[in-house]
Each structure stands twice: as C-alpha cells, then as structure tokens.
Image: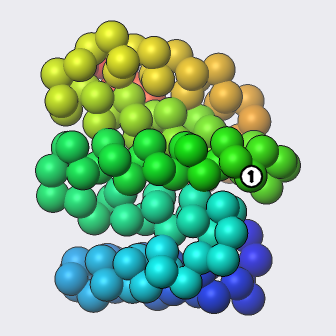
C-alpha cells in the first residue's frame, strides 16, 4: 500500500488508535478516510476499516459488502490479495447474522482466493481467521 496516500495515512492512524484502546478516535479516523476517498480503491480501504468499527452485525455486513463492491470496481492487481480477507469478513458477518448458506458461500470464496495472498504474517492471520470460521 502507498503510505503517502491520505486515506491510507488516516487508516494507519486509526489502527494505532485501536491498538491504544481508543476506539472512538479510530472510528473517527476511519470515517475521515471514507470521506477523503477519491476513487474506488481508496473507498475499498476505508470501508474495510469502517467495517471493523461497527457495533452490529448488520452494520458490519454493510461495510464489508461495500468494501467488496469497491474492490470489484477497482478490478486490478492492487486488490487481488484482498479477496480472501474480504470474503472471510463477509462469512463472519453472515455467520453472526445466522445466515449459514451465505456464510459458507463466502467462506469457500475466501479459501479459493487464499493463494492470491503473499506468504507471510498477513496470510497467516487470514488462514487462522478462516480456520476459526470453519470450526463454527
């Protein structure tokens, strides 16, 4: 990711606020990132972080779906490695809403896209999250 991108910078600040236990500050930064988005790529990134801050499964589903929609609109290599995580997040949201068919559909899509994520800690975290989803 381009760390000079203002949306990415706001999301990085938001993640730091999350780690410091300041969820309200993080949420405000992610919302500012959404408002600053100039294209679908920016909006995809901001929506991903907004989804993490939602207090209801319905709102989380909304922002995760928005994130996926924006990634689809980008449709190039910049988002290729996002799909495993995006579908995993949707699977989790559908599971929380007791919609097992949709949860399974997105779980399988997440697994299918896992090879697009480069090896390393990020892929490991997605693999772990998918394993948790599959156990439920």
Of the pair 110 and 76, the residue shown nearer to us: 76
Image: 99 above or below 33? above
| Rendered residue at 34%/47% (across/down) | 62
Of the pair 85 and 79, the residue shown nearer to us: 79
Image: 27 above or below 135? below
Using the rendered image of the protein, determine whether residue 16 is visible from the camera's viewpoint.
Answer: no
Q: Residue 113: which quarter of the image?
A: top right
Image: 84 above or below 82? above
- Residue 107, percent from left and from top: 46, 22
Location of the C terminus (image quadrant): top left
Instruction: From the viewer's perspective, tell me whether residue 129 is left or right of residue 120.
Output: left
- Residue 70, percent from left and from top: 60, 52
- Residue 46, percent from left and from top: 50, 68
Instruction: From the viewer's perspective, tell me whether residue 125 is left or right of residue 95.
Output: right
Using the rendered image of the protein, determine whether residue 61 is visible from the camera's viewpoint.
Answer: yes
Q: Secondary structure at mark 1?
A: helix
Question: In this figure, what is the number of numbered marks?
Answer: 1
Please identify the residue farthest to the right as the structure is shown: 77
Please identify the residue farthest to the top as the structure is shown: 101
| Rendered residue at 23%/19% (across/down) | 99
- Residue 103, percent from left and from top: 35, 21
Of the pair 135 and 92, the residue shown nearer to us: 92
The residue singled out by tag 1 in the image is 74
Of the pair 82 and 65, the residue shown nearer to us: 65
Image: 105 above or below 35? above
Location of the N terminus (image quadrant): bottom right
Instruction: From the viewer's perspective, tell me whether residue 67 is left or right of residue 82.
Output: left
- 10 Å neighbourhood of mark 1: few (<14), some, or many (≥20)? some
Instruction: From the viewer's perspective, tell me whether residue 61 is left or right of residue 117.
Output: left
| Rendered residue at 42%/47% (across/down) | 64
| Rendered residue at 77%/45% (across/down) | 75
Q: How is the image coloured?
A: rainbow
């Amino acid at each position: 990711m381009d760390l000079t991108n203002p949306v990415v910078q706001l999301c990085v600040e938001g993640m730091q606020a999350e780690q410091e236990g300041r969820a309200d500050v993080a949420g405000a930064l992610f919302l500012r990132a959404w408002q600053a988005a100039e294209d679908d790529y920016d909006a995809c990134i901001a929506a991903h972080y907004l989804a993490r801050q939602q207090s209801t499964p319905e709102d989380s589903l909304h922002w995760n779906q928005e994130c996926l929609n924006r990634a689809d609109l980008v449709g190039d290599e910049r988002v290729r490695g996002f799909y495993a995580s995006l579908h995993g997040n949707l699977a989790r949201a559908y599971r929380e809403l007791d919609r097992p068919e949709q949860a399974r559909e997105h779980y399988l899509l997440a697994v299918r896209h896992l090879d697009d994520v480069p090896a390393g800690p990020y892929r490991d975290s997605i693999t772990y999250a998918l394993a948790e989803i599959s156990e439920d």
